[in-house]
Amino acid sequence: MRLHVLQHVPFEGPAAIAHWAAGRGHALSISHLYAGGALPALEHFDRLAVMGGPMGVGDEADYPWLRAEKALIADAIAAGRSVVGICLGAQLIAEVLDAPVYRHHQQEIGWLPVTLTDAARADPLCADLPAEQYVLHWHGDTFELPEGARQLARSAGCEQQAFVYDERVLGLQFHLESTLDSVAAICSYCADEIDPSHPYTQTVDAMHAGAREHVEQIHHTLAALMDRLPE
């Protein structure tokens, strides 16, 4: 399989997604959009992975490549490709599918649990996954469930955490790709976003401790989802 990654900032790369691809023998390529990287043609990839970033889906004036990126995501979905969106990536997929994306009333930053929905527990995509799992969150925006999508997970702080559309398009508001290094990077680059007045926000020290505790389990979940999506 040929996996192509859309990367929005230098410190939010594919991380464990790259490790998964290497372990399965899949070809991996990356568009570094923040550095003027070109978008791929549809015929050059089988699966698209859309990473996170601090910008919002509507920030096209500051990041003009967002417009072309959304068009590519829409074209990939229409062409039957599998697509995985992480955080901002999930929000971009939601917008492409005509769902509202907006500022949430509170941020979620840190290792916090998500719970599978009843629909997810009956879904082969989520077979044998933990009913509740600690994952890394780093977002202040959220979205409505796209029409025709199936909600897979929620959290106490945010109703929409994961969805699947057409059995091959997966949106994850959280970061299953996190590694010790990627957690250190986002904590370094985005520390100014941490607002301790929000109830679902952790300190940097707590996030480093959570990474040491939880990364192995989230990588199992990531691999299960990536393996089960159609190629």
Image: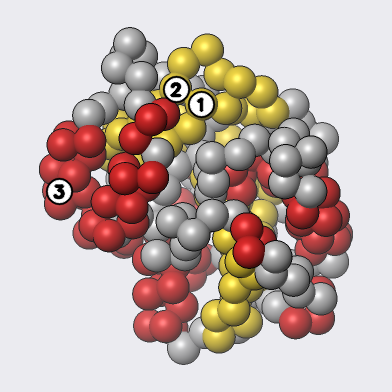
In this rendering, which labeled residue sits more in front, label 2 or label 3?
2
Q: Quadrant of the C terminus?
A: bottom right
- Place residue 34 in its image quadrant: bottom right
**Residue, disc 1:** 140
State if disc 3 and disc 2 touch (CB < 8 Å).
no
Callout 3: SS:
helix
| Residue at 22% from the left image edge and 36% from the top image edge | 204
| Res 218 seen here | no
Between 146 and 143, the residue placed more toward the observer is: 143
Callout 1: SS:
strand
Q: Real-space Cα distance between discs 2 and 3?
A: 22 Å
60 over 104 or under it: above or below: below
**Residue, disc 3:** 213
Q: Residues within 10 Å of mark 2 (few under 14, many from 20)?
A: many
Callout 2: SS:
strand
State if disc 1 and disc 2 touch (CB < 8 Å).
yes
In this rendering, which labeled residue sits more in front, label 1 or label 3?
1
Q: Real-space Cα distance between discs 2 and 1?
A: 4 Å
Q: Earlier in the sequence, mark 2 or mark 1?
A: 2
| Residue at 61% from the left image edge and 48% from the top image edge | 89
**Residue, disc 2:** 107
- Along the horizontal axis of the image, is 148 left or right of 83? right
- Along the horizontal axis of the image, is 158 left or right of 92? left
5 over 150 or under it: above or below: below
User: Which residue type does callout 1 highlight?
Assistant: Gly
Q: Residues within 10 Å of mark 3 (few under 14, many from 20)?
A: few
Q: Residues within 10 Å of mark 1 (few under 14, many from 20)?
A: some
